[in-house]
Image (spheres, helix red, strand yellow):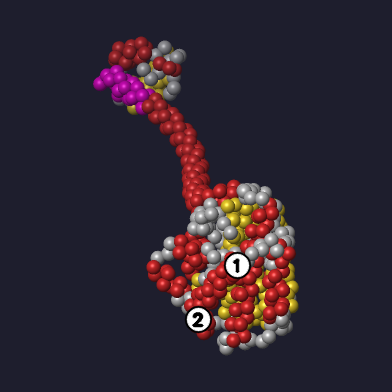
Amino acid sequence: MPFLPQRYFSNLFVSVLIEDSECRLLARVIRNGKIKRTYEAAFDSPDADVLEAKIVEYIKHKEEECLDVYVAYFLDALGQGVVPTAHAGEFERYSVDVKHVRQVVMEESWSVYASYIEIHWAQNFFEPLGLDLLYSPFVLLHECVKKEGFPLRETLYMYNHRDSFAIAIYKGKKVLFGAFFRTVASEEKELSDRSFEASTWDEMEEEKGVENLVKLDELEEEEDYQSLDDLDDLNNMDAMVHGDERGEHAFDEGVVQPVDEAEGARDSEHSVALFGRSMLMYKYIKSSIEEFYQNPNYQSDFIEDIIIFDNYETSQTVFDMLENELLVRIQLQKVKTLELMSAMAVKDVGL
Amino acid sequence: MNRSFIASKPKPIFSLFSKIWLVFIGFTFCVMALFNFFITYKISTFQSQAQKSITLREEYRSKIESNDIQIAFIEHQKATAESIYASNDILRESIKNLFDLVPDQITLSRVVMEKSALVLYGRTPSKETYNFLLASPLRSIFHSSNTVFYLDSDGWHRFVSTNKIIDSEGFNE
């Protein structure tokens, strides 16, 4: 590694995650590879297109005592995915237009890609600060799998977030199949809000590989909500929900959400939302596995294990349904995306 | 291996603004260093020139001194020469006066001029002629004047007149 004098100064590494109109930050002051200080914060971020001024102000304030700030963002946009090849020439086979995506080769055998539109959107979003690193959930998932040890048999790994999740089927170091899904209905609205030029839109539409899969899932999503409306006894859902909320952090400058309703009602609402999400997740996973089994492009074999790296919370319902329907064993492991991103950012920047 | 969609490298320690400042400071430093070298060079040049000038001044001074000595010597010589010329002039005048003093009848055969004495040898037709025409003026000039006559074969008298002056200073006059 080349000698970098910057290493001996304090550098601020900020990991940013925006979910459900909430922006969560993990800022670490790192000097000579050692964490000197850690700040955690959460802000309301109602506008999906503009980074809130108070966030910029917060980071700028923290930056004052440091030499430089490096911002890493978790890309949770739909215009991304995985292809089981390292060669850009083979992208066409998986219905991905290589001209409009940026490729990151992993383990010299497979690739993670993201649409330029999404990358540019993220860069524009962080323009007041400057975006230094943009991580795909697949990359974070791979980091977790690497820590866990690569599987010998086909294993489905899932990287679960509040608004989205990514799945990848590993065999050894190679990913055979991967897909990314959003579990919130607002995605379409967000996409339409983003002010891209007509030509950019055309480019986006060419990413058929991602879009086709999403369209399929959106149809199913609508059905799920229909079925949810029919449920009568919402309170019974509590028993089915895995209520572990240890993943929530105590934030130093967090914005307290207003409590307008009674505690019980809020819990019920949360449980319903979680159940709906679980159903959606089940559908997505099921359709993905079916796609994996049926599509001749993928070297498929029977999946026996599913390992979930969970950054949010996963309902026991999904576990039961998956185990019963797909005949798989499920393991759950808690991960902290912000901490993972922060560690990866330090390594990738080279400080 | 970069795992991010955006490649980030360590940011430079110095911002563009700082770099511009550093370049400016460096440039100024270089200019000042150059100026310093120039000044040092000039100072050393001037010092060597001053040293040369001091040496030259010493040479000139010694030359002036030797010239002064020469001038003094030449002036002394000149003074000596002038005094000799003056003495010679006076002597010539004295001789001329002396010869003017000697009347036509008397013939001088030899004149001996000493520092404070004048010895005249010559012939006179008679003692009286000598005493009237030459002895009187001689006596008025010199403090003592003795003349010895002896007769010659042709009837003229040879004489030796010894005239002395007590104060030699007035001899030339």
In this rendering, the answer to whether B166 lies above or below A184 is: above
The mark total stands at 2
Is A38 a magenta residue? no
- Residue occupied by mark 1: A230
Q: Position of residue B13 (x, y in %)?
A: 58, 55
User: Can residue B82 be seen by looking at this rendering?
Assistant: yes
Q: Which portion, as a residue range, is magenta?
A: B84-108
Q: Main secondary structure of the magenta part?
A: helix
Closest to the camera, between mark 2 and mark 1, is 1
Q: Position of residue A321 (x, y in %)?
A: 69, 75
Front in this rendered view, residue A338 or B13: A338
Image quadrant holding the C terminus of chain B, namely: top left
Q: Is residue A287 left or right of residue B26?
A: right
How packed mark 1 is, by other alpha carbons closer than 10 Å (few <14, some 14-19, many 20 or more), is few
The Cα atoms of the two marked residues, 2 and 1, are separated by 38 Å
Front in this rendered view, residue B7 or A152: A152
- Residue occupied by mark 2: A95
User: Can residue A348 be seen by looking at this rendering?
Assistant: no
Residue kind at label 2, given as amino acid type: Ser
